Image: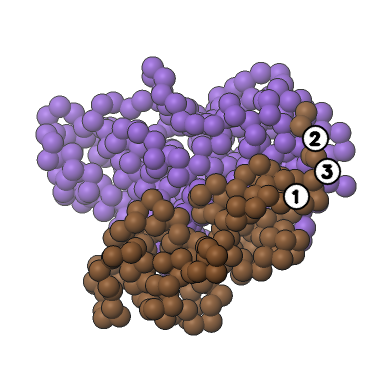
Chain colours: A brown, B purple
Amino acid sequence: MSEAPETIAFTVNGRPVRVGSRPLARLADVLREELGLIGTKVGCNAGDCGACTVLLDGEQVCACLVALGQVAGRSVLTVEGLARNGAFSSLQRAFHRHGAAQCGICSPGMLMAATELLSRRPRPSEKEVLDALGGVLCRCTGYRKIVHAVLDAAPGAPAATSRPASRTAWTILR
Amino acid sequence: MGCYLRPTELSEALEALAAPGDGALEIIAGGTDFYPARVGRAPDERVLDITALAGLRGIREADDHYLIGALATWSELMRAPLPPCFDGLKEAAREVGGVQIQNAGTICGNICNASPAADGVPGLLTLEAGVEIASRSGQRTLPLAEFILGNRRTRLGPGELVTGLRVPKPAPGARSAFLKLGTRAYLVISIVMVAALVEPTHDGKVARARLAVGACSPVALRLAELEAALAGRPLDKRLGAVVEARHLAALAPIDDIRGAADYRLDAARTLVARALSRLGAELGERA
C-alpha cells in the first residue's frame, strides 16, 4: 500500500519544491501559504470562479480542487512563472496594451487559462478564446478587453481593437 | 481522525474499502465535488484517492461495447475517437463547468455524486449505460437507471467501487444530441437538460428513439411514452412536433433559485422538441 510520505515533492514554475505532507490540503492553499506564491487567488474554493486556475502538467485546473497528494512528481505553472528573466510574456504584454485588468483579481486565472490555450493554438478564434476562458469569471471588465488581449497575444497577430465584437460570439455570454 | 490512502493496485483499494477500520472511506478522484462540499473546513475524513489506479484510466472499445474507465475525465471523453452516438455525451462534457473542471472531473464521479443536475446522466441513460462495480468479493454491473436512486443516493454499497461505465454499441447510424439550459454559457448548474438519441431505419424513419431529461426530477428520467410515439415517424426537421405536454408528465420539477417548476416543464418541452428536430433534420438528410 502506498502510504502518504512525510513530504511531497513536485515542481513549481520549473523549480523543485518539497512541502510537508498534508495530502488533502488544497493546492491553492499550499501555493499561497507554504510557498508564498500569492499570485494564485482564491475566490470561492468551490471551482465556481476560476480565480485559482493554474496549469498542472500543462492543463488548466482549479487549484482549490486539487489535493496535494495528487501533485507528487508533477509540474505546476502559476502566474509567477509566466515572465522570464524579468520580461513579461507576449500574453502579459497584450493584457497591458489592451487594459485587460481592472481590479485584477481574475487576471492570474485569465492569464493561466489563456496560456494553456495559446500553447496549443497560437492563433485562436474568438469562440476558442471564449471556450478556454469560460471557466474564469470577471466582475469588472465585461470580458471584451481580455478576449482582445488574448487574440492579440501571438507575436505578429493582427491587432485587435476595442470596437464591438461579432454579435454571435458575444451572444453566448448572455 | 482522518487518513489518506492512494493505492496503485485495484486489489489494495478494494481491500481498504472492505475493511475500513475506523469508519467508511470517502472516495476521491478529480475532487470537483469533494472540495466544493467542504468549503470553509479542512477535510478530515478518511479518504481513498483512486487517481493512481492506472487500470481505471482510458476509454476502450470492445466487440459489442465501449468502456469508460472510472478515471476518464470529461476532456478525455471529448478527445476520444468515438462514433456519433456519443456526440450528445461529448456536448455534455463540453458544457460541464469550464475547462478546468473538464480536465479534472470524471464521468464516473459525476454519476456517483448523483446530483439531480448531473450533466452526464441524461446522455448515459440514452446510451443505456451499465455501471461496473467491483468489490473484494467480485464484480457486478447495474443499469445506470437502477444505480442512481435519487438525490445524491446510489446503490453503491459498502466496500464497493465503480470501475467504469459500459456502453453497448447502438445500431449503426445512431445520432445523439444534448441541450443544456442555464443562466450562462459556462460555470452553470443546469436548469433543464435534455439528451436524445435516435436510431434510423434504412428508409428515413425512426427505428428507436431514446430521450432523457435531467434537473427536472430527483434523478434524470427517460420519456417512455414519447419514445413509443416517435417509433416509425419520418426523420425530418418536424420531428419535434410529436412532443406534447403529456409526454413530460413523469417529470417532477421543483421550484428553486434557478427556476420555477412550471418554467422547467415548459423549457423541457421546448428543448426536447428542439433536440428531436435537430436529429430529425440531420438523419433525414442522410436517408
Q: Chain of mark 1?
A: A
Can residue A110 be seen?
no
Q: Which mark is residue A6?
A: 3
**In this view of the protein, which residue sits in the foreground, A103 or B3?**
A103
Q: CA distance from mark 3 to mark 2?
A: 9 Å
Name the quadrant containing residue A64.
bottom right
**Residue A86 position within the rendered picture, expressed as x and y whole percent measured from the top left:** 55, 69
Do the residues marked 1 and 2 share a common chain?
A: yes
Using the rendered image of the protein, determine whether residue B167 is visible from the camera's viewpoint: yes
Residue A1 drawn above or below residue B249: above
Mark 3 vs mark 1: which is more N-terminal?
Answer: 3
In the image, what residue type sits under mark 1? Answer: Arg
Number of residues whose C-alpha sits closer than 10 Å to that of mark 3, classed few (under 14), some (14–19) or many (20 or more): few
Residue sitting at 67 percent across and 65 percent down?
A37
Mark 3 → mark 1, Cα distance in angstroms? 10 Å
Residue at the disc numbered 2: A3
The image quadrant that residue A133 belongs to is bottom left
- Of B252 and A39, the residue lying toward us: A39
| Secondary element at image label 1 | strand
Neighbor class of circle 1 (other Cα within 10 Å; few <14, some 14-19, many 20+) is some
Let me know if marks 3 and 2 both belong to one chain. Answer: yes
The amino acid beneath tag 3 is Glu
